Amino acid sequence: MSGDVAGEFEAHGRFERTSGSGGDDGGTVFVPTTNDWDATVAVSSDGTVTAEVVVPTLDAATNDEVADVVEDGWYDTFERRVRDADSVTHADDVDVTNVSRVGGDITVELTVVPRSGKAADDTLALVNYVEGTWFQGVVPGYDYVEKVQAMREQAAQNAQGTDGTPL
């Protein structure tokens, strides 16, 4: 079964196979090619997909100092919201297995038993959900690092071409 699932990722235009092996059983590893933050996807021998998405903390995304109470509240909100990832796909089984904060990084780990023929699409939707949830948590008024500021400017430009904001 994993060959079929891995093949879906290989044929998908938004994933690239990497040289590593994933999971305890040495599955195949892919990275999404259209995302802003780091993410890896491992396909196990039974076809289960594990995704890991790493996004910055609020403090790591700004040039300003963020008060601990703000950082902690922001992280708690992000963690609660990202745990709703199972609502963004029709996959058979989605589980947010871990959300952790170490230093300036937040790592979100998800497992999914994908639908037949939809493994890459289901997984990309989950990766995008984590990133979108992070982006929705950007707090106005801070001086953001260059990468985040560029993302904000791109979102504003995209919104100008529509009848409202992209949210």
Image: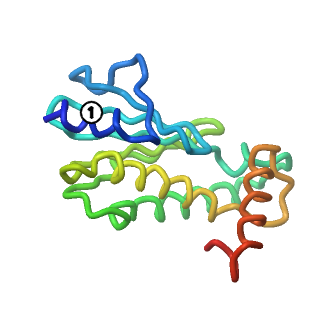
The x and y percentages for residue 18 are 43, 22
Vertical placement of residue 98 versus 159, above or below: above
Horizontal side, residue 16 vs residue 65: left or right = left
Vertical placement of residue 32 versus 85, above or below: above
- The mark tally for this picture is 1
Amino acid at the residue labelled 1: Ala
Given residues 110 and 16, the one toward you in this image is 16
Colour treatment of the image: rainbow
Residue bearing the label numbered 1: 6
Mark 1 neighbour density, 10 Å: few (under 14) some (14–19) many (20 or more): many
The x and y percentages for residue 161 are 73, 72
Residue at horizontal 85%, vertical 50%?
Answer: 64
**Secondary structure of the residue carrying numbered label 1:** helix
Quarter holding the C terminus is bottom right
Given residues 13 and 87, the one toward you in this image is 13
The x and y percentages for residue 23 are 28, 27
Residue at horizontal 34%, vertical 33%?
Answer: 10
Residue at horizontal 44%, vertical 41%?
Answer: 13
Quarter holding the N terminus is top left
Vertical placement of residue 155 versus 40, above or below: below
The x and y percentages for residue 32 are 48, 39
Residue at horizontal 62%, vertical 62%?
Answer: 73
Vertical placement of residue 53 versus 134, above or below: above
Outermost residue, top side: 19
Residue 132: which quarter of the image?
bottom right
